Image (spheres, rainbow, N blue to C red):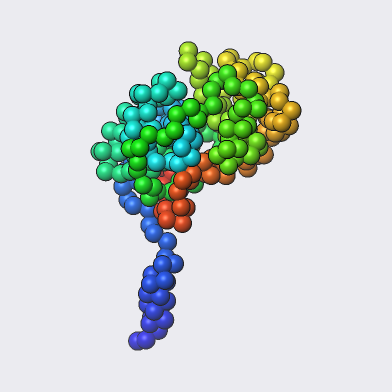
Amino acid sequence: MHSFRPTLLLTALVAYCGLAKAQCPAVWTDVATDLGTTFLGSDGKCTDDARAAIRLAFHDCFPGAACDGSVILANECTDRAENSQMTGICATLSDKATQFDIGVADLIQFAAAYGIASCPGLPAISVKVGRVDSSEPSPEGQMPGPNDDAASIISAFAAKGFTATELVALVGAHSAAKDLNGNGLDTTVEEMDTVFYTETADGSAPSSLNSDKFLSNSTETSADWNSFGADAATWAAAFVPAMEKLSLLGNDEASLTDCSSVIVDAFA
């Protein structure tokens, strides 16, 4: 009759002490299902919306060193030239945030994680929710440009707390990116793989950003560049934590709720 009491007492104690992990709100499963209709084509491969979502995560977090949704909520998508390619995904995610009654900052990072999973090749990155949205514009002139040299990009990332190795790892997201004319930055643009590194370095990519070329041959970054190009596991081991670090900028990780399983389940 009394054998269950210790279990009940332990459960109560864990909850009282705040040790029980919060469950991911069920709405995020619905969001994942909805994103699948946008981010995956009829061939099961990632779409341009998925690519744009990956890029948008960086553009929200980097300028103000805070992932706060301001890229959408402060109209930075339409007001800043650096975001001109992402007006469509900004409008899409803004509508979805309203539709599902969820935070814009959270949705941007969730969509990026889903986008990465849509372009296969990497382990799933963790995604957490609970950020506070902001409509206050982030500082201007913070985003590295496509023609910036390696030294200036390294400096910009260092100012946000990222090492040169983390920078080179994050740039690998360009493996699923396209230029302004719709040309892939490598020949396997529907996958998150290391072909981008080798093709950028040897000049065989369909298109390359000057900034990527500079990073590929800079004395400060070429070793990491070549290392990632030679071994997918090495790149994954660097990219995943760097991307997770980016997604948490300006936020207290302990206050967020882990919804990583939703992404994993969506692609199971």
Task: Tell me the quadrant of the picture where the N terminus can be found.
Answer: bottom left
Residue 109, image x, y percentages:
43, 40
Mark yes or no: residue 239 visible.
no
Residue 5, image x, y percentages:
38, 82
Relative to 38, does residue 113 appear above or below in the rendering? below
Residue 141, image x, y percentages:
48, 27
Q: Which of 122 and 227 is in front in this view?
A: 227
Mark yes or no: residue 210 visible.
yes
In the image, 223: left or right of 135? right
Q: Which of 257 and 25 is in front in this view?
A: 257
Residue at horizontal 53%, vertical 18%? Answer: 184
In the image, 173: left or right of 198? left
Relative to 29, does residue 112 appear above or below in the rendering? above
Residue at horizontal 49%, vertical 44%? Answer: 249
In the image, 70: left or right of 125? left
Relative to 139, does residue 86 appear above or below in the rendering? above
Q: Which residue lies furthest to the top in this view?
A: 181
Residue at horizontal 71%, vertical 25%? Answer: 218
Image quadrant where residue 38 sits: top left
Q: Nearer the viewer, residue 142 or 104?
A: 142
Residue 153, image x, y percentages:
60, 29
Residue at horizontal 37%, vertical 86%? Answer: 2
Image quadrant where residue 42 sits: top left
Q: Which of 165 and 142 is in front in this view?
A: 142
